[in-house]
Amino acid sequence: MRLYAQTPARRIRQVLADLSAAALIYAAVKLALAVHDAIERLADPGRKAESAGNSLSDGLADAGDAASKVPFVGGQLKKPLRSAAEAGTGLADAGRSLQDTVGHVATLTTVALIVIPVVFVLLLWLPLRLRWIRRSAVTQRLAADPGGADLLALRVLTGSQRELAALPTPPGGLADAWRRGDKQVIADLAAIGLRQAGLRA
């Protein structure tokens, strides 16, 4: 199985197409990761809110514990401080929730920004590459088989006539020479068929 053509012009086009596809996929991944980082920065207020809420909750809980030791009124002082500590916990929970939401949005956006361009590039590039690989393998096998040169020559005769103008035209024309089994004409036509597939005779 041949991955690249033997003819220089087609091989250069294939290498450039492969490099372009790889570059586009790399650029899509880099862009997606940059967008992910930018979205993740939106979670900073959530981290600050969580930190502030935890600090407030811990501080008020400690104050409540200390106030409970005050004789006679300790129990009454502890209740509002405990309530305030729970409000601090709520603030911390809200901060965590914001971080989770931003994290989910960042992940989904990153996946979309990677998958959509990569699928688009693969749908444009991969079928053409696989088709050429399959076609070149079939053409090589055909050229190696007995009588394969005749079939390649026939394929060239029934295809585009542009390259046939360069061949010397025998009496009766190329088709007549092919029907007669003219070995030189068949070899020339088969070489064109191989060249069209990006292969050398």
Image: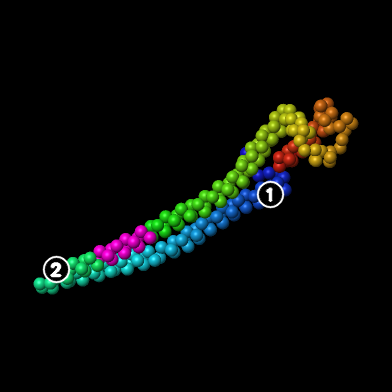
At a point 67% along the width and 38% down the height, the residue shown is 136
Q: Is residue 88 magenta?
A: yes
Question: Which numbered tag is attached to residue 159?
Answer: none
Q: Quadrant of the N terminus?
A: top right
Magenta stretch, residue numbers:
85-98
Q: Position of residue 63 (x, y in %)?
A: 21, 71
Q: Residue furthest right?
A: 171
Magenta-colored segment: predominant secondary structure: helix
| Front residue (pair 121, 92) | 92
Quarter of the view holding residue 77: bottom left
Q: Residue furthest top?
A: 180
Q: How is the image coloured?
A: rainbow
At a point 55% along the width and 55% down the height, the residue shown is 28
| Front residue (pair 54, 148) | 54
Count of labels in the image: 2
- Specify the amino acid type for callout 1: Arg
- Specify the amino acid type for callout 2: Gly
Q: Is residue 157 magenta?
A: no
Does 89 sit above or below residue 147?
Answer: below
SS category of the residue bearing label 1: helix
